[in-house]
Amino acid sequence: MTKHEKPASFSRRALLKAGGALVVTIGARAAIDPAHATDGATAATTKPPLTPDQLSSYIAVNADGTVCAYFGKMDMGQGLSVAIRQMVAEELDVPFDRTRIYIGDTDTSVNQGGASGSTGIQDGGKQMRMAAAEARRILVEMAADKLGLPADQLTVTNGVVHATSDATKNVSYAELIGGKFFNVHLDWNGKYGNPLYAPGKAKPKNPKDYAIVGQPLPRDDIAPKVFAQADFAMDIKVPGMVHGRMIRPAIASAVPVKVDESSIADIPNAKVVWDKGFLGVVADKEWDAIKAAKQLKVEWSNASPPFPDQATLYDHIRQAPTRKREVGKQTGNVDETFKTAARVIEAEYEWPFQSHARMGPGCALVEIKDGHVTCWTGTQKAHFVQTGLASILQVPQDNVHVIWTTGPGSYGRSDADDCVADAAVLAKTVGKPVRLQYMRDQGTGWDPKAPASIHRVRAALDASGNVVAYDFLSKGFSRIDVDTNGSQPKDTLAGQTMGVALKSGDGFGFPGDSYGFANKRTAWETIAPLLDRASPLRSAHMRDPVGPQIHFASESFIDEVAAALNMDPVAFRLRYARDPRDIAVIKAAAEKAGWQTRPSPRKDQSGDTVAGRGIAYAQRGPTRVAVIAEVEVDRSTGRIWARKFFVAHDCGLIINPNGLHHAIENNVVQATSRTLWEEVKFNNKTVTSVDWRTYPILEMPEAPEQVDIVMIDHPEIAPSGAGEAASRPVPAAITNAVFDATGVRIRRAPLSPANVKSSLS
């Protein structure tokens, strides 16, 4: 067995040969093949195709009764795989430890939209729950036929269907399935197989009957990672593999005009791959590939990328022509109300480009053999990468197998998809499997960036100090200059350097809140990218795309208005928030923090070290989060310690409190890093923040000493996303706390020591 032959690349054919399993697809509304009797209880002898409309594309019951769930998303370290297993086990009435999950593998799962938008449980889990419920219904019907009893007189305990009145009259799932496939067609209706969930024959359980969902079950993937027993993407090896390295220009937009291959003639079996702007090297040994990349003599074209000076970035955004404008919420007559306002408060906020800066740069392995392509990658979206590989290699998509393997971090459109495309070009050219890993400077310098932006906010007050109008505008680089995934070569560095036709997208976002101002308008505008092709400053999704920067502005401004009116920040929000769930999280966070009602800033402090507290809240889709931060500010150095956080979190039904708790914590820590430290630096040639010294992040001693969490459970509300929502209010909570401590409002991120000290002075 080679090192990469793991359950993550599970073969259904191999499973049937070894143990005789039945693969069951789970869905909402099942239409049974009329050729079969007993409502689908007859099993097919051949496996239906792996398609979203087949029950056999989602779940398998093995001969030993264990249940395998095939999930078309991946787990970014949130514990999602545990939660999905809980949902499947719950609906099928099998013990949790009798479930297995195989995720992000294009050979064993259908495309469920990838891991983004916090949709793992919200959408993917909903599919798996509905499917498991339907599978249980069909199994009970099969048992009824076998036992000669009505289905409504049967129940299921630990995967065994038995008479409600006599448990000795029973038959197990394994006995019912017999190593065959359910021939059940699912009436999906929507993108990626998302059903509209019109009432079907199967009804999921009532939450009051849950025994597994809601339990804080621990993750089982942590120990193997800690003890180096699990493979990451960079650990995968296959026979005959060679190593690759990419060569990027020192000046963005430059392309090779002359490459001296003789300059690496002393490196054994080193080869150059050059196609227009694409330039890479491969060698048998990884160190030789690194040496070849450094040693290769390249003459580059003259280039002058149209990058502004770092100091004029925000002026560039202000002055750049708007490429697209979109208006979100608009109520009343905002412009007319401002004309008659007794008082107008306005402010502008600035947010920089930020890098994913994954703990390890992108790594991918691509093998092309007999017309078939196999790829191991830490991408968030294996099925989209499958499409991208088929396109860039010009092979049928069915001939491409992408295996998601844990990578060194994720959250958005990182360098993982670019690495896959680069590795594919290298592998096709040299005719061998290529393992490509980026260098640190490439991973941080050339990954897609979270977009830089400015945010202008105005509030109109009447003579009594009531907010009568609110106007919010974001303007910045698009969050989809390159798309959210690598499904098209135009959105990868490989495609762009080789000259594919480009189409930059336009998108930003709006504040998520329920403030009930009578006259209200929110809007965004996007501007053209600084460089339209193969840019180190191309912008795309990062964790909670544009959420932190938008709410850095919107919730800081709400605080500014409260301060201008000499009102307590919590009381001011409660005056205008309209959604009961929003009000509940604000109150819960305040109660958890022991909030004392008073206006900001504090008046009772002196000396270099001062402390303050700040609140912010936000909606992210159906999820609501309120965050209170307590900070210490050293006025002599400008250094901020975000010492404590109090978080109230409402994402509907809670599947696994343990996983949710840790997801909220890691949101808080990463968002704190982005707030206090992270900023892409560049000059008129390229990005200059390329390592941990030039692109610093939050370090262990700076981490919060306390994150207290209130998880508000709503069993009556469908579960929604928790992978990103808690990131959203953190920047404003910290910034509002700094204002409370110092009396100085900082409107530009990051709140690094230099920026803070400058603001305080």
Image (tube, rainbow, N blue to C red):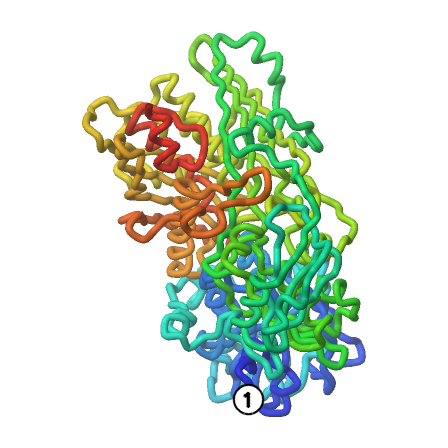
Amino acid residing under circle 1: Met
- 68 vs 641, left or right, is right
Q: Say if 298 sits above or below 647 in the image.
A: below
- 684 vs 600, left or right, is right
- Regarding residue 483, the answer to whether it shows in the image is yes
The residue under label 1 is 1
Q: Position of residue 570 (x, y in %)?
A: 36, 30
Residue at disc 1, secondary structure:
loop
Q: Say if 50 sits above or below 723 in the image.
A: below
Q: Position of residue 87 (x, y in %)?
A: 50, 66
Which one is nearer the viewer's eye here, 509 or 331?
509
Farthest bottom residue? 18
Which one is nearer the viewer's eye here, 718 or 109?
109
Question: What residue do we see at 53% from left, 40% from top?
Answer: 682
Q: Quadrant of the C terminus?
A: top left
Which one is nearer the viewer's eye here, 619 or 445?
445
Q: Position of residue 727 (x, y in %)?
A: 45, 45
Local crowd at mark 1 within 10 Å, few (<14), some, or many (≥20)? few
Which one is nearer the viewer's eye here, 91 or 681?
681
Q: Position of residue 705 (x, y in %)?
A: 27, 49
Q: Say if 170 sits above or below 189 in the image.
A: below
Question: What residue do we see at 68% from left, 51% from top?
Answer: 300
Question: What residue do we see at 75% from left, 72% from top?
Answer: 398
Total numbered labels: 1
Question: What residue do we see at 56% from left, 46% from top?
Answer: 449
Q: Quadrant of the N terminus?
A: bottom right
Q: Say if 81 sits above or below 147 in the image.
A: above
